[in-house]
Structure formats: C-alpha cells, structure tokens
Image: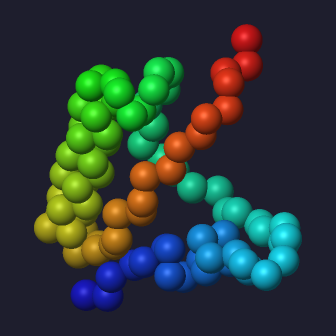
Amino acid sequence: MDKIDLKSDLKTPYRPSAKSVVEVGVPAFNFLMVDGDGNPNTSEKYKETVEALYSVSYTIKFALKREKALDYVVMPLEGSTSPRLQ
C-alpha cells in the first residue's frame, strides 16, 4: 500500500521559494477545523483543542487504513491569526 503525502506532492504551496516572492495556487482541501480565540501560548483550552484535533485526525487515518486500505500522512497543523470578520 502506497502512502499519500500531500505535503511532498504539493511542494509549491508548502515549500515556496525562499529567494523571491511567488504566488502559489492552493488546491481545495477538506479540513478538520476548530474556531476560537485567545492566546495559544497561555491557553489551556488551545492545548486541549489541538490534542482533540490530532486525536480525531489519527482516528480517521487508521480507520481508513484498516477499512479502505488508504494510507496517508496527517498534514501539519495550520492556523490563522486573522481577526474574525464581524
């Protein structure tokens, strides 16, 4: 069974040039997401939320591997510090 690694397959969005500013195209993805606010450096809730996201991500990964013979690398955590639009 081959392992899918989107981070390696999609090098342009994940490893853009360090020498110049480039525009990259990012394909549509499905995400697990939690919305919230606060300081991730001091918030216990943030830590618990990240743990929950990874727990769910790996549960899905291993279920798909077992039931559908589909294996993939869980993508890294991504976040945004943009203020919410009101």
Taking the image as shown, residue 60 lies to the left or right of residue 5, namely: left
Residue at x 64%, y 56% (from the top left corner): 28
User: Residue 74, percent across and down?
Assistant: 35, 63
Vertical arrangement, residue 33 with respect to residue 15, above or below = above
Tell how many labels.
0
Residue located 61% across and 35% down the image: 81
Q: Position of residue 83 (x, y in %)?
A: 68, 24
Q: Dividing the picture into quarters, in which one does residue 34 lie?
A: top left
Measured from the top left, where is residue 38 in percent x and y? Answer: 47, 21
Percent of width and height locating residue 42: 35, 27
Depth check: 69 or 9 in front? Answer: 9
Residue lying at the far left in this picture: please name it: 66
**Which residue is located at x 42 percent, y 62 percent?**
75
Instruction: Please report the residue visible at 33 percent of the width from the left and 82 percent of the height from the top.
Output: 3
Residue 52 seen by the camera = yes
**Vertical placement of residue 47 versus 79, above or below:** above
**Which residue occupies the foreground of this view, 25 or 78?**
78
Instruction: Tell which residue pokes out farthest to the top in this image.
Output: 86
From this view, report whether residue 85 is shown above or below residue 46.
above
Q: In this view, does 65 lie to the left or right of 15?
A: left
In which image quadrant can residue 52 be found? top left
Quarter of the image containing the C terminus? top right
Residue found at the very far bottom of the displayed protein: 2
Q: Which quarter of the rendered picture does the N terminus lie within?
A: bottom left
Colour pattern of the rendering: rainbow
* Residue 56 visible in image: no
